Amino acid sequence: MELSEKKIDSSEKFNGKMLHLYVDEVELPNGHKSFREVVRHPGASAVIVRSNEDKIILERQYRYPINEVLWEIPAGKLDLGEDPIDCAKRELMEETGITARKWEKLGHIYTTPGFSDEKIYLYFASEISNGKTHLDEDEFVEVEYFTIDEVELMIVNNEIVDSKTVVAFFRAQKRGLI
């Protein structure tokens, strides 16, 4: 059975600094027509870090759309044309002051494929060195170190609800990296 939909027309409804909203008319697999609201996002990179003391580095950050403070791994938006690994390294250094010698790709996720094309590239980093943070003027984060067992328990107890963090943790764990 053919499942894909064919775009007939697309109309941009909002053009923001980071997001773009389109309403697309599509032809469904059964030949009927429908509409799809699509948020276009430039993509992002995220990195789960194991410290030299075998701890996981998490950030606490307020997220305005959900009005909550979340525990997350360091992450950030891709700049135009930026390689995802370079974005991960840049964001890690800016938000935590950390650089890492060892990097491994953990794949990618789509955050909300029902209405957005946001793709987050996931990485694992280790063999770290600490330095100075370089936060954006509108960025406020607290960095803390947790044992692997503590992070796993935080996920199970719904204290970590950020999807990129959950996926990166379990992918790294299943690969024996943490």
Image: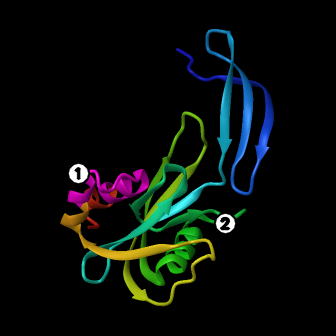
**Which image quarter: residue 11?**
top right
How has the structure been colored for display? rainbow
Q: Residues within 10 Å of mark 2 (few under 14, many from 20)?
A: few
Write the residue at 49% across / 75% down: 92
CA gap between label 1 and label 2 equals 34 Å
Graded by Cα atoms within 10 Å as few (under 14), some (14 to 19) or many (20 or more), the crowding at tag 1 reads few
Which residue is tagged 1? 156
Which residue lies most toward the front here?
67
Name the amino acid, label 1. Answer: Val
Residue depicted at 77% across the width and 43% down the height: 14
Label at residue 82: 2
Q: Left of 4 or right of it: where is 163?
A: left
Verify whether residue 162 appears in magenta.
yes
Secondary structure type for disc 2? loop
- As drawn, the label of residue 112 is none
Magenta residues (range): 152-170
Dot in front, 1 or 2: 1
Q: Position of residue 112 (x, y in %)?
A: 52, 41
Query: Are discs 1 and 2 less than 8 Å apart at CB?
Result: no
